[in-house]
Image (cartoon, rainbow, N blue to C red):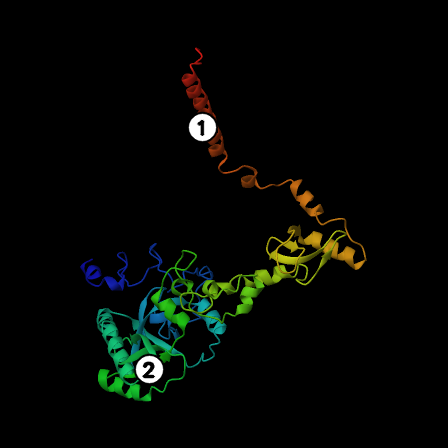
Amino acid sequence: MEEVKEYAFINACPRCMRNHACRNCSRREPRGKLTATDWLSHLPDDNTERLIEVIFKNTRVGFFENADNLDLHIGDLVVVEGSPGYDIGKINMVGHLVKLQMKKTGFKDFKDLKKVLRIADREDLEKFDEARSREHSTMIKARSIAEELGLAMKIGDVEFQGDGSKAIFYYIADERVDFRKLIRILAETFRVRIEMKQIGARQEAGRIGGIGPCGRPLCCSSWMNRFVSVGTGAARVQDISMNPQKLAGQCGKLKCCLNFEIDSYAEAHKDLPPKDAVLESKDNVYYLFKTDILARKLTYSTDKRIPANLITLDANRAFEVLEMNKKGLKPENLSDQIIAEENSEFGDIIGQDSMTRFDKKNNKKKKKNKNRNQVENKDRKNGNVSQK
């Protein structure tokens, strides 16, 4: 147990003394940033799929082959082939799921996969820990060098390879940057192989982390590791106010969660009347004012620009009125649906009683007592105090 305390970053299992959450223990680690379930774990392991997905820093993921048939599990720290040298990462996925994940990401180089060399031992982890301790100072120094060169870029993070022979510099830039001179200076300064990797504002926000307006940790820092473009069309489909301050996330871009429910809203739009549809009754003409898409409720106004004589209808009632208008008929009014809602079997339980109904009774009682005291005081002054 002394070895486990000394190297706490190994996260060794106290039962089998391996640096992973073993199958016999309940200490199962999340798969990187995504806590997923291996839904193929019940299938027999016939060793036909020797593919391994390994996750590194900043959600960098790589696919490798377990050529030596090592006993590997999710959460193991392993040594894999690098370019050049070797790297150290954590196993994120094993078995059949890896092949499906490779197809999903468009990975096609199945034959030229790099290999898993071994499970990381103490010496590997000591060297890896030493390389990681240099990352922050290297980032600060690289930022000052880039500023001296006048490059319009921000170096957000540095990741050293497991053997310390290579460093990946993650940077953000709005325009294309010529960093050839920067690479030469960095290579001479740190004596390692340099690789520059550009990341977007979303990846930077996920790296820093934070709390979103929903009160939960940012999706990009908790479980998202692949990003798709978000357009203003997603907000229009969901009928969200086009306010840039509300639509933008902490990264300054449109919120990723705008894409989460867009399919549901697009499907619900198919069961609603067109936005430009006009409802005609014998007393007035109604124009669409606002829509509750998922509840299938439409609010109409007698004026195109301002809310006037608002009336809320169900989508079915709106379709009925449109069919009548096509036949040249006009209903007496559009309030039939409202009467049906009042007589419906289900009602709004909370809306039936006021939340301050008890306060009102107390206020009336206090007011009654106050008036009574005033009358008694007036009678005392006039000498007309009645004896009970």
Residue 349 point in image, percent of width and height: 56, 39
Please indicate, yes or no, whether residue 276 appears anywhere in the rendered image.
yes
Check disc 2 and report the residue beneath it: 195
Crowd around label 2: few <14 · some 14–19 · many ≥20 (10 Å): some
Residue 203 point in image, percent of width and height: 39, 71
Residue at 57%, 38% in the rendered image:
352
Viewer-nearest residue: 372 or 213? 372
Check disc 1 and report the residue beneath it: 366
Q: Quadrant of the C terminus?
A: top left
Viewer-nearest residue: 207 or 105? 207
Q: Quadrant of the N terminus?
A: bottom left
Q: Secondary structure at mark 1?
A: helix
Crowd around label 1: few <14 · some 14–19 · many ≥20 (10 Å): few
Residue 380 point in image, percent of width and height: 41, 17
Q: Three-letter amino acid code at disc 1?
A: Lys
Q: Earlier in the sequence, mark 1 or mark 2?
A: 2
Describe residue 271's horizontal placement relative to residue 153 as left or right.
right
Q: Secondary structure at mark 2?
A: strand
